[in-house]
Image: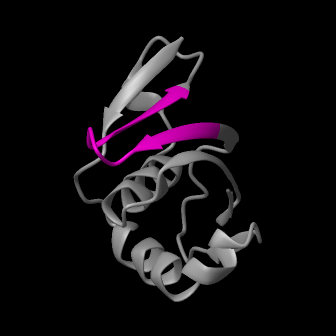
Amino acid sequence: MLYTFAGSGRSKFSSIIIEVVRSQRQALDLGKQIIIEFDEEKPGYPGGFVVNINPKRDVFTVEFSNVDPSRFPARIKATAIALCQEGFEGKFEISHKAGTLKLLE
């Protein structure tokens, strides 16, 4: 099912994600993968998604098979929101497993 989420908001993961995206923007623009390590006790939901960022509409869309959109992985959602807020546009691969997030344009 295709879900549309707001491209605004904050989570406890926002500050580290925005910091890394800003500092590694050039690498991301060049198609290099960015890795973010989280120091959290809870591993969070694992998964990998292709998100489509549309900063002009302040939204991102993603295929997600769960009927409950609140179960969408928080770290992946926070990353998509950060990309939207930083003005990125287009499709990005975002995956998360056991505290390691990977981001690729």
Magenta segment range?
50-62
Residue 44 vs 99, above or below: the answer is above
Considering every residue shown, the one lying at the far left of the view is 9
Between 98 and 58, the one nearer to me in the picture = 58
Which residue is depicted at the point 52% across and 38% down? 52
Whether the magenta-drawn stretch holds residue 59 is answered as yes
The answer to which image quadrant residue 78 occupies is bottom left
The spot of residue 30 in percent (x, y) is 72, 73
Between 42 and 11, the one nearer to me in the picture = 11
Which residue is depicted at the point 41% across and 17% down? 68
Considering every residue shown, the one lying at the far bottom of the view is 23
Give left or right: position of 101 versus 80.
right
The spot of residue 72 in percent (x, y) is 48, 34
Considering every residue shown, the one lying at the far right of the view is 32
Residue 103 vs 94, above or below: the answer is below
Between 59 and 68, the one nearer to me in the picture = 59
Whether the magenta-drawn stretch holds residue 33 is answered as no
Quadrant of the snapshot with the N terminus: top right
The spot of residue 82 in percent (x, y) is 39, 62
Quadrant of the snapshot with the C terminus: bottom right
The answer to which image quadrant residue 49 occupies is top right
Give left or right: position of 9 versus 36.
left
Q: Which colour style is shown?
A: one colour
Give left or right: position of 90 versus 4.
right
Which residue is depicted at the point 53% across and 29% down? 62
Give the overall secondary structure of the magenta segment.
Answer: strand
Between 96 and 92, the one nearer to me in the picture = 92
